[in-house]
Each structure stands twice: as structure tokens, then as C-alpha cells.
Image (cartoon, grey):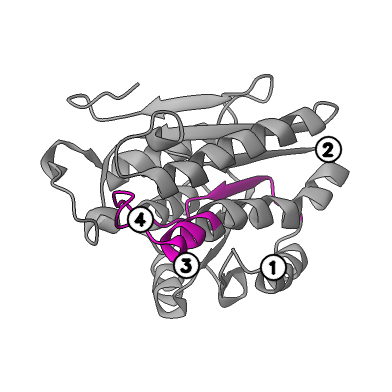
Amino acid sequence: MEKLNGKKVVVAGATGGIGSSLVKLLVQSGAEVFITGRNNEKLSNIAATHGIPSSHFLAVDISDGTQMGLFADTVLHQLGTPDILINVAGIGIIKPMEQLSLEDFSRSIQTNLVGAFLFVKSFLPAMKEAKKGLIINIPGVLGKVPMAGAAAYSASKYGIVGMMQSIREELKRTEIRITNLFLGGVDSPFWDEIDLRVQKDKMIREEEAARSIWFLCQQPASGVVSEMVLQPFNHQAI
């Protein structure tokens, strides 16, 4: 297993439950972490809690090309070329087609898919120059097995899978590795605004989800974990 001590890691979506738990694990492992999210106050609190300097966090909307350009320039100046990119950012809109608006659909694609695209695109030139690195996305189980009411969400997550598979083909002559984590239901605020009956007590805990990402950050240099599935024991969709 690769050690995280001294690794340069960029985390998008660091203000969420999984993201903040992951940041804690990365810092404890000796990684140099740069974090982003939309809420500057939450970012500041997470940074202060884990001893991350003010130069290593910046609030941005990763689905905004202009903001991501500024973010990438800041990261490359303050941190250098990342060893690991982790995208935990995203939104969940779960509605039947009769209630799903074009705005809902567009916002899902813009945030989840375009955001993932811009996050990778912003750092890929530097990583290609270094000819190494690791990119971790979280398409989730609904990026592999759809469910009723998840047309917009699944479209965005299936898009990430196809996009990253294509990018993987472009990177075959480098040592840049790509990993997709298909997480099942996680007991997180994700479900708070979704009108759906769920058994949160049977879901994966945020800390366990974060630990699975932390584990993937340490995969051996001689190979790659292309995909990993983590889902609740009592609700296995795959």
C-alpha cells in the first residue's frame, strides 16, 4: 500500500459529511491537503479544526469554469501538482418524471457532471506533465444501477462513469490512475431534502464511507482499483 505522508491531495466537496470526515483522515495520515466547497464559513471551520492553513482552502463552485480556473491556479501555486484528486461534491434531486423540471435536470447535470469535468480538466495538464497521479470520483450505486425517480441523478452519475472511462483511454501512456467508488446509501444530510422514505439506521455511516475513500488513496503503485462498490449489507443493489 502507498503511504499518504507527504502526498498532495485536493478534495472537492470538503464541507459535506463524507468530505469533512475524509479530510480528517487525510490530515492524520500526513497528507498535505487543499480543500474546497461552496460554503466559506464551513471550509474555514474545517481547516481550523484540522490545522489546514488559510492558503490551502478556497470556496468555489466547481461547476463554474471561471471559478475553477482561479481555483486551479491557486492550488498549483500554493500546493503544487496534486498527487490525488478527490471529488466528493454533488447534489441529489430524486423526483418522478411528472415532478422533475428541466431546471432540476439541468442543475443535476451542471453540478454533478460538468463539475466533475471541470475539476479533472483543470488539473489534468499538470498531472500529465508529471505523468502520475490518482483521480477518485464517487458516481455512487445509482451511477451503475438506476432506481425509480432518479432520472436526473442517474444521468449525471452515468455520465461521470462514461467520461472517466474515456479519459482513462487517453491516459494509458501515463501513470495517472482513475478510480470510481460506487457508494450505496450513506446516512448523511443528502437525504434531508428528498421526499423518500429511507431507513437511515441501516445505511453506511459517513465515517465508513470516508474511510473507504481514504483506503483507495493508498492503493499500490503497481496496480489500480478501477472500481469499488460499498453498499449497505441489508440493501445490496449490485
Mark seen at residue 65: 1
The local crowd at label 2, few if under 14, some if 14 to 19, many if 20 or more residues have their Cα within 10 Å, is some
Residue drawn at x 32%, y 35% as measured from the top left: 147
Residue situated furthest bottom in the rendering: 41
Residue drawn at x 59%, y 64% as measured from the top left: 62
Q: Amino acid at mark 1?
A: Gly
C-alpha gap between disc 4 and disc 2:
37 Å
Residue 7: percent from left, percent from top:
64, 46
Residue 169: percent from left, percent from top:
77, 28
Q: Secondary structure at mark 3?
A: loop
Q: Amino acid at mark 3?
A: Gly
Q: Pick the residue in front: 89 or 109.
A: 109
For the question of whether residue 13 can be seen, the reply is no
Q: Nearer the viewer, mark 1 or mark 2?
A: 1
Q: Earlier in the sequence, mark 4 or mark 3?
A: 3
Q: Earlier in the sequence, mark 1 or mark 2?
A: 1
Q: In terms of image quadrants, where is residue 145?
A: top left
Magenta residues span 81-109
- Which residue is label 2 attached to? 131
- Which residue is label 3 attached to? 51
Q: Nearer the viewer, mark 4 or mark 3?
A: 4
Question: Do the numbered discs 2 and 3 sit on residues whose CB atoms are within 8 Å?
Answer: no
Question: Do the numbered discs 4 and 2 sit on residues whose CB atoms are within 8 Å?
Answer: no
- Which residue is label 4 attached to? 93
The local crowd at label 3, few if under 14, some if 14 to 19, many if 20 or more residues have their Cα within 10 Å, is few
Q: Earlier in the sequence, mark 4 or mark 1?
A: 1
Relative vertical location of residue 153 with respect to residue 221 in this rendering, above or below? below
Q: Amino acid at mark 2?
A: Lys
Q: Secondary structure at mark 4?
A: loop
Mark seen at residue 37: none
